[in-house]
Image (cartoon, rainbow, N blue to C red):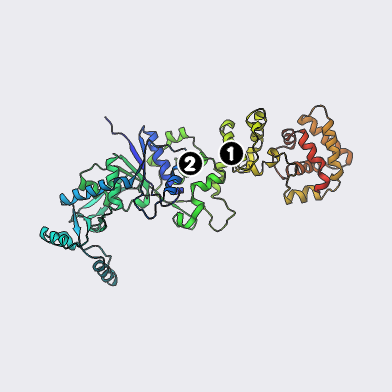
Amino acid sequence: MTEEIRVRFAPSPTGYLHIGGARTAILNWLFARQNNGKLILRIEDTDIERSTSEMTQGILDGLEWLGIEWDEGPFYQTDFIKEHIVAAERLLASGHAYKCFCSKELLEEKREKAKALKDDFRYDRTCRGLSEAKVAEFEAAGRPYVIRLKVPEGDGAVVFDDAVYGTITKRYQDIEDFIIVRANGQPLYPLSNVVDDARDRISHVIRGQDGLGNTPKQILIYQALGEKLPVFAHMCLTLDPKRAKISKRKHGELVAIHFYREHGFLPWALVNFLMLLGWSTPESREYFSYEELLEEFSFKGMNRANSVFNVNINDPKFITDPKAVNMNAHYIKTLPLSELEPYVRAELEKAGLWQEAYAGEKREWFLATVDLIRARYHLLTDFATLGLPYFSDDVEVSIDDKPRRRNLEKFPSLREWLPQLADRLENMADFSEAAIEEIMRALADEVEVKPGVIINGVRTVITGQLAGPGLFEIVTTIGRERVVARLRRTPQII
Ligand code: GLU
C-alpha cells in the first residue's frame, strides 16, 4: 500500500494571513488535492504573548475566502505542549538530550569572549558530560536548566534531499547542541513542530525557504525520536522590489490577504497570481484553472531563486503588483457571468447600489450590464465606482475633468443640442442601437458638427467617463428614461 499523502499548513497566529503564508497554504492544499491526500491545519500558537485569537480567526477567514479547505483541524499547538515535554523526557532518558545548567550570564560572557576573538559562538557542551550525580546535585539545589539536544560528534553530517533545493548537507560540527526546552519548561519550536508533524503522520513538509536552516536540527530530532522523516520541500521567498523579504512588519497591510479582498480581488485571481510567485511551467503559462493547476503542478516547477512581488510601499495610491491587477482583470473579464454575479452583488451592496430587482425581474438586465462593462475593469470595486452611471438612478453623474474639458466645455452649444436630442430619443419608436446612432448623426448634420461632438458629449453627460463600451450600447443599457433625464440636465452641467 502506498503511503497516504498528508501535509499541513502551520501558521503562527502572530499576524494576519499574508502573501507568504497564503502561498504556503495554497501549495500544501494543491499537493494534497492532487494526491488524494489530506491537508491538516495546525495553528502554532505557542508564542502566547504574540498570538491572538483575532489573528487566528483572520487566518481562517482568509483561507476560506481563498477557497482553501482543510481536512483535519484546526488543531492548536498549545493543546499538545504536554506531549512535547514527554518527548523531551524520552530524549533525556534515551541519552539523546541533556540538561544544561549553564547560567545566562555565563553563556553571555562566553559569547562576548568569542565575539572579541571574532569566533562564532557555539555552546561549548560544558554540561553534556555532567555525571548523573552532578545533575542530581544541581537539581536538588534548585538550579534552573534548559534541555539541549545532543548533536552527534565526529565528521558526519545531516544529509537530506529537499524536493526543491536538492541535496543539503550540514556537518554535525556546524550544529550547536541546541535548546529544545527552555528553563521555564516551555518546549521550543523545532521540537514542538517535529512532535506534532510525527503525531499527525505528515508525509511532506512544504514551507517557506526560511525553514530550511532549521531542517537539519529537526531531522536530528526525528532521528533521536526514532520517527520516520517526511519529505521536505521548501519554497523560495518573496521579496519586495528592493529585495527585502516581504513581511508583515515592513509592508503592513499591503501584503495582507484581507487587503486584496477589500480592494476588489477575486480569490482565484490571487491564488493564480500567488502560484506564479515561485512556480512555473516550461512554457511560462500564466492562467490556470483549479483543474489545470492540479494537472500541472509539481515540485519540479518550483523555482529556487526568490521571486519579486512589486508591492510599492512608497506610493499609497498604488494598489499592488500590476501583474496581480492584470490577473484580476483577466478573471473579471472571462469568468462565467453567474460566477461573477455574487462578487459584483457584494460590491454593489457595500456601496449601497444594490437593488433586489437585480436578482429578480431585472436580473437579465443586470447580467447584460455586467457583461458590457466588465471588459475594461480591473478590480471588483470598479463595478461600484466606474459602474455608477449604470447602477445608480441618481442622475447626478460625476464628470471627470478630462472629458469635461475635452468633450463639454469646448462645445457650449451642447447645452441646446443635448436636450433637443433628449426629445428625439424620447419620441422615437424603435429604441435600437442602429436607430439611436441614426438620430445622433442626423442631429450632428443639422447643427453642422462632426458626429463625434454629439457622441462624445452624450457619453460624457450620461457616464462622466472618457472611455467605455460603445456609446449606442451604453444608451440602450442605461435605458431611455434615464438617458433622457441626464441629457436634459446638460445646461446645468456645462
Ligand atoms: N509556525 C511556523 C511558521 O509560521 C511553521 C513553520 C513550518 O511550517 O514548519 O513559520
Side of 251 relative to 170 (left or right): right
Q: Residue at x 29, y 51 (%)?
A: 190
Residue contact between numbered discs 1 and 2, judged by CB atoms under 8 Å: no
On the image, the x and y values in percent for residue 129 come to 14, 60
Q: Quadrant of the N terminus?
A: top left
Amino acid residing under circle 2: Val
Of 188 and 39, the residue lying toward us? 188
On the image, the x and y values in percent for residue 261 come to 53, 44
Q: Is residue 309 visible?
A: no
Q: Is mark 2 within 8 Å of ligand 1?
A: no
Crowding at dot 1, Cα within 10 Å, few <14 / some 14-19 / many 20+, comes out as: some
Q: Is mark 1 within 8 Å of ligand 1?
A: no
- Residue denoted by label 2: 271
On the image, the x and y values in percent for residue 266 come to 54, 40
Q: Residue at x 73, y 51 (%)?
A: 401
Crowding at dot 2, Cα within 10 Å, few <14 / some 14-19 / many 20+, comes out as: many
- Residue denoted by label 1: 346
Side of 198 relative to 21 (left or right): left
Amino acid residing under circle 1: Ala
Q: Is residue 325 visible?
A: yes
Q: Quadrant of residue 478?
A: top right
Q: Estimate the spatial distance between the alpha carbons at disc 1 and disc 2, rounded to whole Å.
A: 20 Å
- Which comes before the other along the chain, label 1 or label 2? 2
- In this rendering, is residue 203 above or below 360? below
On the image, the x and y values in percent for residue 106 come to 23, 68
